[in-house]
Image: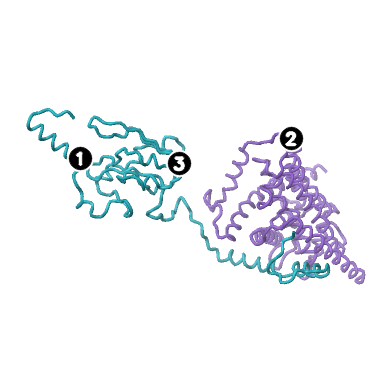
Amino acid sequence: MAYIKIVDETTPKSNAQKFVQFWNRALSGEMFVGLWLVFKEFCSSKIHTVQYPLEKLPLSPRYRAVHELKRLLDSGNERCIGCGLCEKICVANCIRMETRYGEDKRKKVTEYTINFGRCIYCGLCAEVCPELAIVHGNRYENASEQRASFSLKQDMLTPIDKVLSGNDCEYEGVGSVSYDADLKIKQTPLMYLTKEESKADESGVKQDV
Amino acid sequence: MTLYVIETLIKILLVVLVFSALAGFATYVERRILAKFQRRIGPNLVGPFGVLQILADGIKLFTKEDIVPSGANEIIFRIAPVITAATAFIAMAPIPFFPEFEAFGMVIRPIISDINVGILFVLGVGAAGIYGPLLAGISANSKYSILGAARAAVQLLSFEVVSGLSLLAPIILVGSLSLIDINNYQSGGIASWLIFSQPIAFLLFLFAGYAELNRTPFDLLEHEAEVVAGFATEYSGMRWGMFFIGEYASMISLSFLVSILFLGGFNPLGFIPGGIAIVLKVMFFIFLFMWARAAYPHVRPDQLMGLCWRVLFPLALLNVLVTGFVNLGGN
């Protein structure tokens, strides 16, 4: 079955008609129309290239690039409570965390790795995190020569001076800290504990912590 | 005699060096011009305006591993790119690039050998050049390559008769096969150019030339949409590069050929001296190659054969016939 052009109203029947159609197409001036069209482009010389390393396109605030691990705004401790939800929901199975109970009976995260070679940047981990400890940043240039630089937790944790200087910006949206979060803030259990500790210290009884 | 041999050897060396450098430069020019046609920038980072990109490409091609696929016919596989590159340069032997000029107290003729069958030699060597892709495709033990080789055969069958026949008409008028004679025939100003007495032959030869050089409208041998890279699928490094040096060198030599045959060659053009005039013409034709590449889609093999045998071939015959009758009547 041969291809038939839709624009042709009638398909040629006899050989003579086919011959005429062939020559009409062969000798029509369509070739020069094409040449003229691209020559106009050549002369107008519009360039649509983004010269990538030198200029970058703006990213949407919801862009999902390499993760960032956030710190608590007041103390600078990492927010992660070791619940393991991100590890569970990860569809690419690229997050691995190891937790243990610390001496203060609180969960400590000892190991936290994200295999960026496998991560598909679906964003489920950031969505499921109850503490907003893992979010997506805007670092999308992932190429590296060293395997170690793919998943160093220290690199992914927000720098402490950035947190303390108040420059750690968060995006508004589902699950993010609201603008009036400071007003709603309550003391964390740890704070009650330290208060009781100080009371106990005053009364001279040794607490088993 | 010794002087003649030395002079010829120097000329051969110069032609090979200059034209392989120019072929490399043509790849850069092609990328830049094609980019402008397609609203891109093209190579612009290595060196001023990206000119040194040629050098970078050269380093890359020379240092890449030279792979011969298993099951390939090794000797033929290694020789095939040499055939393409060599025939491209051999075809330049009877082409006069510039008018005669005087230097070091002697008259220098910028032609390697003024044989009196110049055009025949160029056509013959050019047709032998198709052995490069053909043998490369057959010997590579790859289906893509063998498809490319089959298409090379189709292409040879299509254009070769047309390019021969289309040149017959101007040769009838000039009465000589030597390119210098053809050039001198058109020395009487623009009105004596052969393009005005032989416009059909000019178009036919140009089309056939595009097909011969695998340039884009007739780019069957490495059709990105159908065959991956055609005959050169299995090639790597400088062996791959030699195919393209050959292609660009024969592109330049075809531009010289068309300028000499139909556009007055190296005759002075008004106030422009002959040497510069022919360079301008050649530059226009190289631009035309890239222009056509930007403008036209590929054709299918059956379309190429249809075009060559049903349109160009009858036109060429008709042209020869009419030219013959007119020439007889003129005498």
**What's under tag 2, amino acid-wise?**
Glu
Residue B253: image location, x then y, percent: 73, 54
The numbered mark at residue A189 is 1
Q: What element carries label 3?
A: loop
Residue B278: image location, x then y, percent: 71, 60
**What's under tag 3, amino acid-wise?**
Ala
Horizontal side, residue B130 vs residue B276: left or right: right
**Toward the viewer: B284 or A88?**
A88
Which of the 4 image quarters holds residue A172?
bottom left
How many residues crowd mark 2 within 10 Å: few (<14), some (14–19), many (20+)?
A: few
Q: What element carries label 1?
A: helix
Residue on which disc 3 sits: A92
Residue A27: image location, x then y, percent: 75, 69
Q: Can residue B107 be seen in this view?
A: no
Residue on which disc 2 sits: B74
Chain identifier, colour cyan:
A
Q: Looking at the image, is mark 1 or mark 2 nearer the viewer? A: 1
Chain identifier, colour purple:
B
Q: Identify whether B44 is placed above or below B201.
A: above
How many residues crowd mark 1 within 10 Å: few (<14), some (14–19), many (20+)?
A: few
Please tell me if label 3 and label 2 are on a single chain: no
Residue A40: image location, x then y, percent: 59, 67
Q: Do the residues labelled 1 and 2 touch (CB within 8 Å)?
A: no
Q: Mark 3 lies on which chain?
A: A
How many residues crowd mark 3 within 10 Å: few (<14), some (14–19), many (20+)?
A: few
Q: What element carries label 2?
A: helix
Q: Which residue is drawn at 67% across and 50% down?
A: B23
Q: Do the residues labelled 3 and 2 touch (CB within 8 Å)?
A: no
Please count the marks in the image.
3
Q: Mark 1 lies on which chain?
A: A
Q: How far apart are marks 3 and 2 (CA)?
A: 46 Å
**What's under tag 1, amino acid-wise?**
Pro
